[in-house]
Image (cartoon, rainbow, N blue to C red):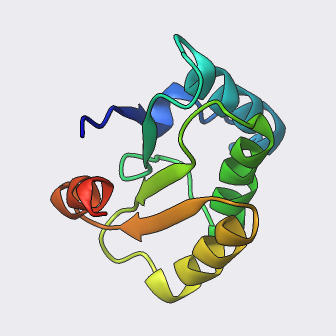
Amino acid sequence: MATKIKIIRTGDFLQAAPEGTIDLTKSRKLLVDVAMAERPPADYDLLIDFRDATLSMSITDIYSITSELSQQGDTFRRKVALLLAPGHDFNKSSFLETCAYNQGFSVETFNDFESAMRWFFDP
């Protein structure tokens, strides 16, 4: 079965507030806009690449931004890989995965690209 994957990098949607922190409201909206661009409904999975984030992001920030996707219905196939920089606390990421699962998403966190890509092809 063919799988389409849309890769979104933080530079495509993260917005900074004037004081140098993340503007969560603008970033959430921009992520949805990027995810919905050129879409036939439910036609692809998402890989959101947070490795190049220049702003400091907590797991709460990541959750707040990605939870916006749950409200978009059939925008994509509800499988989202989050690619985090090495050294990120993956114990906290399990909270994010559980919350996403409760909203009908299959979300996994990774710290290497190859593992994330293999996950999309696992049954």
Rendered position, 32 above or below 38: below
- Which quadrant is the N terminus positioned in? top left
Q: Nearer the viewer, residue 22 or 101?
A: 101
Q: Position of residue 109 (x, y in %)?
A: 43, 68
Q: Position of residue 111 (x, y in %)?
A: 30, 67
Q: Nearer the viewer, residue 103 or 53?
A: 103
Horizontally, residue 68 falls left or right of residue 7, namely right
Q: Position of residue 4 (x, y in %)?
A: 33, 32
Question: Going 65% across and 78% down the picture, which residue do you hit?
Answer: 98
Question: Going 83% across and 38% down the picture, which residue do you hit?
Answer: 25
Rendered position, 66 above or below 63: above
- Is residue 43 visible to us here? yes
Query: For the view shown, which residue lies furthest in the bottom direction?
Result: 91
Horizontally, residue 78 falls left or right of residue 102, namely left
Horizontally, residue 2 falls left or right of residue 13, namely left
- Is residue 18 visible to us here? no
Query: For the view shown, which residue lies furthest in the top direction?
Result: 38
- Which quadrant is the C terminus positioned in? bottom left
Image quarter of residue 81: bottom left
Query: For the view shown, which residue lies furthest in the left direction?
Result: 114
Q: Could you tell me how many numbered marks the image carries?
A: 0
